[in-house]
Image: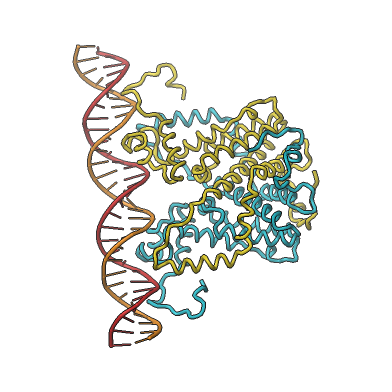
Chain colours: A cyan, B yellow, C orange, D red
DNA sequence: TGCAATGTCTGTACGGGGTACAGCTACCCA
DNA sequence: TGGGTAGCTGTACCCCGTACAGACATTGCA
């Protein structure tokens, strides 16, 4: 915002609103009522303003959402991560944990993060930081870019599904009488169809943990590690290495 | 449940609509116009019916969406996966590829998948299938459940972010004059802030591929493999290993 | 054969959402 | 001191989800 560099000459009355106020309101709404609660009207009402005032700061609702996601992911930081004297893997793990914490604190934004295109500033922030770390680790640009994409994908994907899985809408409202029969029958059929998965659901939930998240992350980091041997082949390599699959022949890819 | 089994006595006129017709319409709408295009009114219009008719078959719009996601993920199948004589890893990879194909064909549903709670029939279908495979592979129930969760998380997360990343909204519509200055300034600031990531974006995109997806999957499968040694510790293991920020040396080798 | 019950679909309407358009007001600068 | 402009409001439009009440066809049963 310092782009108005030289003369911060402002016209009009002093702002009673600011982007941050609107985003704060949006975030609190999302925290309370889920992703859809961040309506333009709701945000405006929360800051005590007419709905249209929002359009002075954001082009449309999606711009508000993007800015919200941006601010949230951009704020992911941590002492360990910022400390360049730390081992690079520890820094990445620190970032991953902080990201997880951040999204777990605001589960409602997860769908918004996922729905946002990956090339926005928010993802770029993450990429940028990872790229720095990988450069420190000695990866060349291409390898760093690939590693960055792989990790951002894993981190956001895992955290998103973990958190979104925990974000259940609660018991559904009662069904209208006319449709109740059909749907209850369907529910019963579902339970019949997936007895084992249903039974395992509780077990599964108990094992979804930060440990597991970190474990997967470390497995991927092993492959990224330049000192390791099993970095992914850049696609230039034909199926030889990739198809070498631990006792299984891998099917055709694309 | 099975109560209606004996006499399929129906009253009323023969259905001119069916769930599948509505879901077909919803899917085509999503394919054409993104996740939000599947409005109740739109679906009804596409099948040539009043909007309310939809409520005869689904409790509300979210039920339609859930059924759509359910049908899509439930339909993920493949010859190799179904063939129990195949090595289990090949079967899992086959499922993963088919899932990727399916979602890549219908990118618009990805946000819907992510937004759906993980305990719905759709995810249960995936879990159920993976659990079968893992059981065949000799994993006990708990290990299978953990592995299943890890893989569903990875698969859906990776594919979702890949596909959603490819699902860019295109160039944004022109901004209203009043706000243009502020936003272009912001855009410039963004480009300044993330020069490296911006530059790397194209490179990154070029390397996002099925290969990379499979590579990550295989790394995780290595850990799941009962014949392998480095399965994730079930959380029983204290922090010793985890807090150890291994200074870029692989903690384990395969 | 006729009547009542029931599932399917329509007409209408309400509340809420995004947002375009046209102002009003207070402030800044010339 | 007056024009210009940023910040904000009032109003209005259209789309969306969906509740309510009924029209209609089909069926089971008397």
Residue A88 horizontal/vertical position (percent) = 73, 59
- Vertically, is A50 above or below B107? below
Say if residue A173 shows up in the picture.
yes
Q: How many marks?
A: 0
- Vertically, is A108 above or below B180? above
**What's the residue at 73%, 37% (across, down)?**
A243
Task: Return the residue nearer the eye: D3 or A208.
Answer: D3
**What's the residue at 61%, 48% (across, down)?**
A158
- Vertically, is B14 above or below A252? above
Residue A84 horizontal/vertical position (percent) = 72, 66
Residue B190 is left or right of residue B204, and the answer is: left
**What's the residue at 63%, 62% (across, down)?**
B196
Splitting the image into 4 quarters, where does residue A207 fall? top right
Say if residue A176 shows up in the picture.
no
For the C terminus of chain A, which image quadrant?
Answer: top right
Residue A17 horizontal/vertical position (percent) = 42, 70
Residue B247 horizontal/vertical position (percent) = 78, 58
Residue A82 is left or right of residue C19, and the answer is: right
Task: Return the residue nearer the eye: C8 or A166.
Answer: C8
């Amino acid at each position: 915002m310092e782009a108005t560099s030289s003369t911060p000459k402002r016209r009009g009355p002093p702002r009673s609103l600011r982007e941050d106020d609107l985003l704060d309101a949006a975030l609190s709404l999302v925290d309370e009522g889920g992703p859809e609660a961040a309506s333009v009207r709701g945000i405006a009402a929360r800051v005590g303003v007419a709905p249209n005032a929002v359009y002075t700061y954001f082009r449309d609702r999606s711009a508000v959402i993007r800015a919200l996601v941006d601010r949230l992911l951009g704020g992911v930081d941590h002492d360990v991560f910022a400390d360049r004297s730390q081992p690079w893997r520890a820094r990445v793990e620190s970032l991953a944990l902080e990201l997880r914490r951040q999204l777990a604190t605001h589960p409602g934004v997860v769908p918004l993060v996922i729905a946002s295109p990956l090339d926005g500033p928010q993802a770029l922030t993450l990429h940028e930081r990872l790229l720095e770390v990988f450069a420190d680790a000695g990866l060349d640009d291409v390898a760093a870019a690939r590693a960055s994409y792989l990790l951002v994908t894993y981190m956001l994907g895992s955290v998103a599904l973990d958190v979104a899985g925990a974000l259940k809408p609660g018991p559904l409202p009662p069904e209208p009488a006319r449709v109740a029969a059909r749907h209850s029958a369907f529910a019963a059929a579902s339970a019949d169809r997936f007895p084992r998965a249903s039974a395992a659901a509780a077990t599964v939930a108990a094992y979804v943990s930060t440990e597991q998240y970190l474990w997967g992350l470390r497995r991927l980091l092993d492959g990224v590690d330049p000192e390791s041997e099993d970095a992914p082949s850049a696609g230039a390599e034909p199926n030889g290495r990739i198809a070498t699959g631990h006792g299984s022949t891998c099917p055709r890819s694309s």
